[in-house]
Amino acid sequence: MKNLVVGAGFSGATIARKIAEELGQKVVVIDEKSHIGGNSYDYRDKNGIMIHKFGSHIFHTSLEPVWQFISQFTSFNTYMHKVIAIIDGVETNIPFNFKTLYDVFPHTLARRLEEKLLAKFEYNKKVPILEFQKQEDEDLKFLANYVYEKVFLHYTTKQWGVDPNEVDGAVTARVPVYLSCDPRYFQDKYQGIPLNGYTETIKNMLDHPNIEVRLNTKYQDISETFDRTFYTGPIDEFFNFEFGELPYRSVNFKFEEYDKEYYQSNACVNYPCNYDFTRIHEYKYYLDDKSDKTVIAKEYSEFFERGKNERYYPIPNEESALLYAKYLEKAKTLKNVYFLGRLGDYKYYDMDKAIARALELFEKIKGE
Ligand code: UDP
């Protein structure tokens, strides 16, 4: 069997590798870009700093099969991501947790709030902001309004163009109110940054005698026939947008280089309430790169427009779900074409979930 994989990001590389290795079949992987890696693409710049071209990527998973799979292609450092937010000029932790209380409030107020929270919630519980807002106690109501306003309202409006009540609850629930002292962004068992970067990891995944990679190649450029196609590109584009375009948010990174060792105190600093950008990434932290220069990127969110910018985030809401369902119905009528990945499934996957989805699809198709 001859297989075509469209897209050389994590989803495409995972399905390609499994087919090439376990089924011993030929796989051609194409990508319209000039590089592999999709949006996880990274490279070392002239200062030796590993830059994540399309925004910070931190690998984290609790899925054993995913960790086993990716660990064949890279080693990881033990970096555990923390996010700092500047709230009213104070550097504190996101997700909002017990430590944050003491950073932003006078001690006696923080203590009262902490006691009330401990009386009401189980320790270590993660509460999505939209649920956390439903408080009856006056102090907790004050706290919920504070967190909503200072952490979520403006950041979400910048990021999605609408306020948190209009964004699918699952999106803001990614960053809950965390009734804990754990300052990390993720609580997964496995976390880290690939020691030689994401591009190198994906290169290793694709480095197999049964895999041929063709860059700068669009799906429309392919004239030969394949027995199966695995499509990780946008599902609406595959069908020539016949039901309409699926909406996406895009991001614009403005890179700046500074002649000093560090620009900020942490790899990622969020500015929920200030400026037009959402956050600043400082890349040298991820692999502890040493240089007397530093490179940062300010992240600006915008709507995706074809030909203008890239697709980053599917926008989960009722309307887009209905539109996606139409494409999915149509996709099911095709024989030997499979959709996967953030764009193929129109799902806000993290890297580990994209790999998990590709591994599951492989299990499904391997006997076919
Ligand atoms: N969010 C927020 N304030 C923050 C961080 C996150 O309001 O300081 C909300 C925002 O709506 C964002 C969502 O939580 O889109 C998910 O954040 P996450 O950091 O998981 O997004 P990603 O890193 O995937 O862009």
Image (cartoon, grey):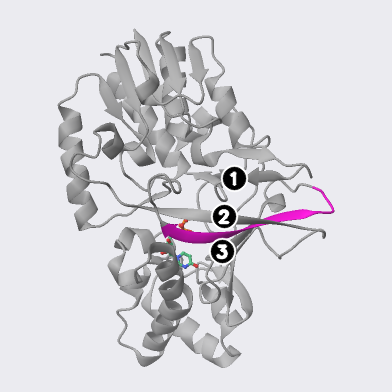
Counting from the top left corner in percent of width and height, residue 71 is at 57, 30
Instruction: Confirm or deny contact between disc 1 and disc 2 (CB under 8 A).
Output: yes
Name the amino acid type tagged 1.
Answer: Lys
Span highlighted in magenta in the image: 290-302
Give the camera-side residue of 284 and 67: 284
Q: Secondary structure under badge 1? A: loop
Does residue 210 appear anywhere in the picture? yes
Circle 3 sits on which residue? 279
Counting from the top left corner in percent of width and height, residue 310 is at 45, 46
Circle 2 sits on which residue? 253
Circle 1 sits on which residue? 53
| Mark 2 Cβ inside 8 Å of ligand 1 | no
Q: Secondary structure under badge 3? A: strand
Name the amino acid type tagged 3.
Answer: Arg
Counting from the top left corner in percent of width and height, residue 272 is at 51, 72
Does residue 362 appear anywhere in the picture? no
